[in-house]
Amino acid sequence: MTEKIVKATAQGRNGEIDFDIKLADNKIADVEVTKSSETPAIFNQAFGKLKENIIDRQSFDVDVISGASIMTQGILDSGKAALNDAGVTVKAKNVKKAHQEVTIDTDVAVIGSGAAGLIAALRALSMGKKVVVLEKNGYLGGATILNGSNVVGTGSKVSARLLEDAAKDSPARLVRDITRECRGTNYPMLSELLANNIGKAVDFVASYADVTYQKAETQTIEHSVDRQIEVPSESSYELITKLAKAFEAKGGQILLDARVEDLETDSEGKLHALTAEGRTQTTHVNFKSLVLAAGGWGARDYKQKKTDIPYYGPMTSTGDYFNFTKKLNLASRNLDWYKIYPHGLEVEPGIAKLTTYSTKEATDMGAIFVNHDGKRIVNESAPYTHFRDAIGEQKGKVAYIVMDQRTWDRFYELLLKYGFTADEVTGFFAKDGKESPVLVKGDLKTVAEKAAIDYDNLKDTLDKYASYVANGKDEEFGRDPKFMHAYEGDTYYVIEQKQRFCTTLGGYETNSHMQLLDAEFNLVPNFYAAGEIIGGANGHDSMPSMMNSWSYASGFVAGTEAADNAN
Ligand SMILES: Cc1cc2nc3c(=O)[nH]c(=O)nc-3n(C[C@H](O)[C@H](O)[C@H](O)COP(=O)(O)OP(=O)(O)OC[C@H]3O[C@@H](n4cnc5c(N)ncnc54)[C@H](O)[C@@H]3O)c2cc1C
């Protein structure tokens, strides 16, 4: 056997992807990635499918993976070019399938394979129903796979085992916390639905999908009691993988690359069928109940420039349902509500990446936030909402963290651990403060000039802060002295902090059975919904973990109701 390795490099979304094409007897035996900075939850799934197709077809002339087309097209183009440059000709197999039309009859159809969709689907399946999930991307998980898996366990057996505080917690206490933190902008019926069902949903997921939980490493102060739990990998990619595995093992069907584009009602106006389009298949599904769990629409609002807050969510959150449900005239609310965080770097115009972990550590180590005038803007150790609102009030909606070498070293370490590459950070320094994201290093005067911060004020601010540290009292903002530390040395680092958003907090209206309503507030027969597409449970400002909690609880209820409706 003659073996050969051809090396190739593709341009991904976050930098270069290096891969080896392994040839045996002039056939493609394997394609192995040696370097990638892409988001693993998406990359592993999309690349896995792409590789399967390449080996199957013995060619790089295959379809891109839906929802990851830039990255997969890059791999296909560079693989083709690398083989060509190496003078390798592989005999391709002609296995390209003709486009086909398929009809499926089912009890429950679910649109979307995020947490809400898969939990609804698994729940309906557990109640003895035939269930099919349609997912437009060529991989599972939507926005869900990008998050850290934290969820509240209020009322669950899981929490009773894991959390000392579990007995102090209750659905009523959770509703009180939600209401306080969003300043009463929540819809009580949905908050109560969340609080009364989250425990059941967590226990259901734990037992049906064999998901294990641990006490979440971070218990955030917005929750009045320790109630946050997470999966061991601290990634919802694990949750989604286990939900999908359990669902398919128990007889559920998942169709990837199946974008729902049309819904059909019968002569009595009851919803009964849908059509989904894919690269190789048009699928018609006849159902008794439909669950819409198609996620948020942040990417749509970013593209349409409906907000100037940089977006950091998936580009696939495009709100397709606004088109295919138009004829049903669904009631909706608060479509301009976003979950806004601070801790954003604007890495491309309109696109943010988050520095939450680094920023939190920097503030714990005593760093301060200043504005263009060189003045402090907030108690840096207060809940993040204070910092978020303070940034929003600044010129250009930007603030800066000022760090010494010791703090920067830790900040940088955490940047690399959570989503940034060393090359990327070098690129930020190379911009020298002239464009976003601003990241500069030098003595105080140099960093002030490069970041366009008033030097005299900045110096005055740091001098005053040093005296607060020495006296153990923050005269300006009352910061807890345990987070106040003196700056060391003459080298400073300044990095920008902007607001960022990805999650939409408004959405369609449902009743307490997660059944959708039309603009006249009539029930739409057979139509249920769950997850981010339904707004209101968390009001204008969801606490940490509460969007996941909403996906769990609403998915559980929608799955139960959709299954009952199919009887
Ligand atoms: C980076 C990031 C971090 C986050 N961190 C947290 C956190 O720490 N805690 C927290 O509580 N929340 C967090 N969130 C929010 C949370 O992840 C979401 O609110 C939640 O996952 C939404 O789940 P979902 O199932 O409703 O939607 P999604 O997970 O987005 O799933 C919807 C699915 O529907 C599919 N779909 C859409 N249209 C169609 C169509 N026409 N046909 C077929 N399929 C379609 C989509 O492709 C997608 O896969 C975060 C979000 C992001 C992006």
Image: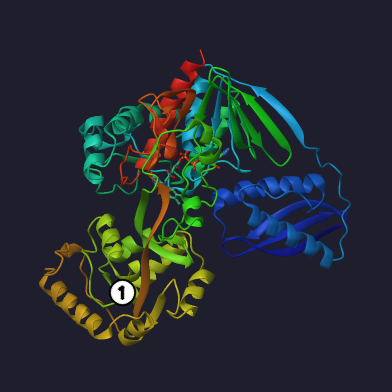
Image spot of residue 430 (x, y percent): 49, 79
Q: Is residue 303 above or below residue 230?
A: below
Outermost residue toward the top in this view: 567
The residue carrying mark 1 has its beta carbon less than 8 Å from ligand 1 = no
Label 1: element kind: strand
Of residue 52 and residue 530, the one placed in the foreground of this image is: 530
Provide the residue designation for mark 1: 402
Image spot of residue 164 (x, y percent): 25, 36
Q: Is residue 331 above or below residue 302?
A: above
Judge from the rendering whether residue 542 lies leftward or rightward of residue 26; answer left or right: left
Please report the residue visible at 45 percent of the width from the left and 47 percent of the height from the top.
147
Image spot of residue 122 (x, y percent): 51, 26
Please report the residue visible at 17 percent of the width from the left and 63 percent of the height from the top.
479
Image spot of residue 73 (x, y percent): 69, 56
State the count of labels: 1
> What amino acid is labelled 1 in the image?
Val
Judge from the rendering whether residue 43 lies leftward or rightward of residue 545; answer left or right: right
Question: Could one spot residue 62 in this view of the protein?
Answer: yes
Judge from the rendering whether residue 370 lies leftward or rightward of residue 528; answer left or right: left
Q: How is the image coloured?
A: rainbow
Of residue 124 and residue 540, the one placed in the foreground of this image is: 540
Question: Could one spot residue 215 in this view of the protein?
Answer: no
Circle 1 Cα neighbour tier, 10 Å, few/some/many (<14 / 14–19 / ≥20): many
Of residue 252 and residue 189, the one placed in the foreground of this image is: 189
Residue 411 location, quadrant: bottom left
